[in-house]
Image (cartoon, rainbow, N blue to C red):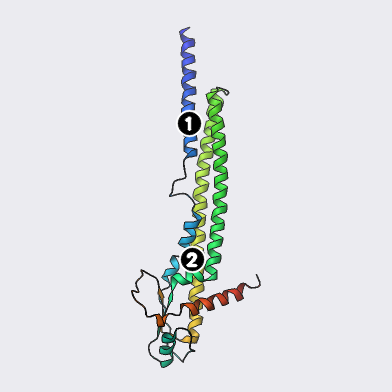
């Protein structure tokens, strides 16, 4: 009789332990993804535009004269043969350059797609964990089966976390690749642009950056954005 009571006590203890562990799984499944690991396509897309702020300076030798444009002060100095400086507003380029808009849209779409895949797996896991918890409470499955299912749920939970981390790293790499492509695009354009205007310096101005003041007559941003978008549309018009 004593032995039977001991066996019943052990079975009850095992069931209670499994139930407790299952509740922990269900609770973990319901919690939000930690902020450090969650894929946030909006923030990543916004980060995309930040590195282009390093387009600060490049030097080209002065030769010949240029044509006049909207930034009269900058073009006039270039025509007179004096040391000529112009600047572009990086924030305006990031807001109005068609290539940036396309890159941002692509990165956001990819982020949403990957996050959707993770969310679908997370929802399926939560459903399985809740069903398992219900079956354990009802004692509808044996202790051995409960242990096996519990182990599988743990593996599934770990797999979702690993997938989330892998997708986050993939988005970060895409962001880096886009930044490099964007910087190359602007820098290469400015070199061609300066073949016409022959500035000694073209600076990148960002609010709160190292340039504390800039004369508006030296601002060639509108002209640069206009020609950037013309070149972009010409290159992609047939695609």
> Residue 71 falls in which quadrant of the image?
bottom left
34 relative position to 141: left or right: left
Mark 1, other Cα within 10 Å: few <14 / some 14–19 / many ≥20: some
The residue under label 1 is: 23
* Above or below for 195 versus 57: below
Residue at (51%, 36%) from the top-left corner?
154
The residue under label 2 is: 179
Q: Position of residue 206 (x, y in %)?
A: 40, 71
Residue 201 visible in image: no
Q: Position of residue 8 (x, y in %)?
A: 49, 15
Residue at (55%, 62%) from the top-left corner?
105
Of labels 2 and 1, earlier in sequence is: 1
Which disc is residue 92 wearing? none
Element under label 1?
A: helix
> Residue 80 falls in which quadrant of the image?
bottom left
Q: Are marks 2 and 1 in contact (CB under 8 Å)?
A: no
Residue 5 visible in image: yes
Element under label 2?
A: helix
Q: Quadrant of the C terminus?
A: bottom right
């Amino acid at each position: 009789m004593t032995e039977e009571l001991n066996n019943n006590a052990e079975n009850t203890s095992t069931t209670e332990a499994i139930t407790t562990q299952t509740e922990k799984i269900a609770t973990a499944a319901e919690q939000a993804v930690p902020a450090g690991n969650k894929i946030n396509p909006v923030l990543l897309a916004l980060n995309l535009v930040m590195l282009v702020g390093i387009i600060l300076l490049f030097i080209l030798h002065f030769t010949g004269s240029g044509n006049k444009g909207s930034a009269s002060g900058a073009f006039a100095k270039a025509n007179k043969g004096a040391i000529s400086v112009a600047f572009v507003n990086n924030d305006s380029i990031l807001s109005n350059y068609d290539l940036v808009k396309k890159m941002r849209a692509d990165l956001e779409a990819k982020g949403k797609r990957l996050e959707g895949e993770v969310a679908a797996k997370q929802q399926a896991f939560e459903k399985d964990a809740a069903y398992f918890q219900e079956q354990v409470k009802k004692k509808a499955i044996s202790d051995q089966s409960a242990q096996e299912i519990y182990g599988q749920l743990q593996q599934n939970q770990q797999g979702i976390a690993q997938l989330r981390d892998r997708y986050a790293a993939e988005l970060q790499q895409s962001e880096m690749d886009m930044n490099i492509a964007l910087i190359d695009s602007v820098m290469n354009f400015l070199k061609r642009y300066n073949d016409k205007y022959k500035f000694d310096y073209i600076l990148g101005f960002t609010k709160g950056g190292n340039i504390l003041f800039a004369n508006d007559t030296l601002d060639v941003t509108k002209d640069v954005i206009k020609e950037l978008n013309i070149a972009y549309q010409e290159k992609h018009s047939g695609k």
